Amino acid sequence: MRIGIDARMYGPKIGGAGVGRYVEEIVTHLQQLDTENEYVLFLRRANFDDCAIPPALKSRWTKVVADIPWYSLAEQLYMPRIIYKQKLDLIHYPHFNVPLRAKTPFVCTIHDLIMLDQTWASRATTLAPWKYQLKQFGQQKILAHIAQHARNIITVSDYAKGQIIHRLNISPDRVHVVYNGVESAAILAQKQNKQTARSLPLPPGVQTPFFLNVGNPYPHKNIETLLHAFSFFVKEHPEAHLVLVGPRNSFTQQLEAEAREIEIPSNRVHFLGFVDDTMLSNLYSQASVYVIPSKLEGFGIPPLEALSHGTPVAASRASSIPEILGPAATYFDPNDIEDLFAAMETLLTNKQERIRVLSASHDVLKKYSWDDHARALMDLYTISRS
């Protein structure tokens, strides 16, 4: 079978910490596991060289330049032709930005439906109102197209599946939950254990103890509440730092302004922007606590990566997060600054709670394997072609 993967979001540099990481992992693990099918990867020029094909696989794996922005009119006009030229049996869109005119049978991964939640979608944009409404109209058309025409839909949690079935009116047997993995972080963690990592360099100004959060700072990620909790925390624990890793954008600028307004000392909060995997692993290993304050998540890979590095997690009791982390977290109400403060303080100071969370993480992490994810995709590709 000749399978295409729309890999234009490949890698965290261009696709962000979520979808970019997802595309990178499925490509890597399909390369390792699938010995039969042929694959065509559609990539932007910016990530074309980052996506490596091992020499032994070049007879079955091909890279094609598709330097077209996602969510664009050009995507709808030109991607169908680029895809058609490759004469594919099936294509996998790892995000919901499906070209409507493409005729190749397809499967699609939908990570969440935040774009349909007006509470957050309207805040997660920098577009003028009329442009935002046009974008919303386009997204709704695309989701309706996926609901009608996708051979199968992949999603990453039972929570997300429930949302997809309800919001898109899709039969449950067409929506398949395939959990993301966390193996790459675990491998890095094995190479440098927590004790060794304590001697490795951190970014300038960052000192232990520090709280860590990784991801795109969209409003639903609720970083503003984390900043407010930390503003009180640092008054009682002046040695503490807060480290925020993720793409720098207009939302970052808003958060930096908020940090100044609530008078968090500038040498105690660090907006690092993008960091490479080696530095990310160092940060995971040396962090005292990882904090995920999100109000909406389809899955959430970074807290699992933190756990795999031996760092306990304080987590929002919202959306898919309790499903994914199970007992391997100290939970808080994402709308309650005092509750978040308490969870941060408990994990920083209470040794028994840290031990409990990390002990629980061993069984939790076993559930999340990129190899298992890739095998499930291979099965779905076979089913979806017939």
Image (cartoon, rainbow, N blue to C red):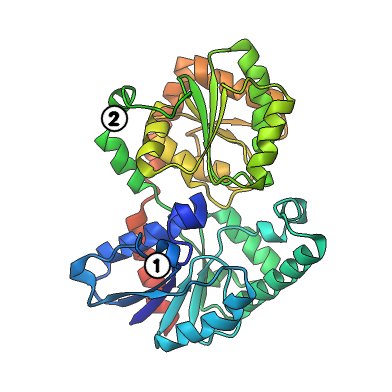
Does residue 308 appear left or right of residue 134 in this picture?
left
Estimate how packed mark 1 is, as few (under 14), some (14 to 19) or many (20 or more) residues with alpha carbons within 10 Å. Answer: some
Relative to 272, residue 56 above or below: below
Three-letter code, disc 1: Leu
- Closer to the observer: label 2 or label 1? 2
Relative to 189, residue 143 above or below: below
Q: State the SS at label 1.
A: helix
Gap between marks 2 and 1 measured at Cα:
32 Å
Does residue 159 appear left or right of residue 61 in this picture?
right
Instruction: Report the residue marked by disc 2.
Output: 193
Instruction: Report the residue marked by disc 1.
Output: 377
- The structure residue drawn at horizontal position 40% and vertical position 26%, both measured from the top left corner, is 286
Q: State the SS at label 2.
A: loop
Query: Of all residues shown, which one is farthest toward the right?
Result: 130
Relative to 347, residue 162 above or below: below
Three-letter code, disc 2: Asn
The quadrant of the picture occupied by the C terminus is bottom left
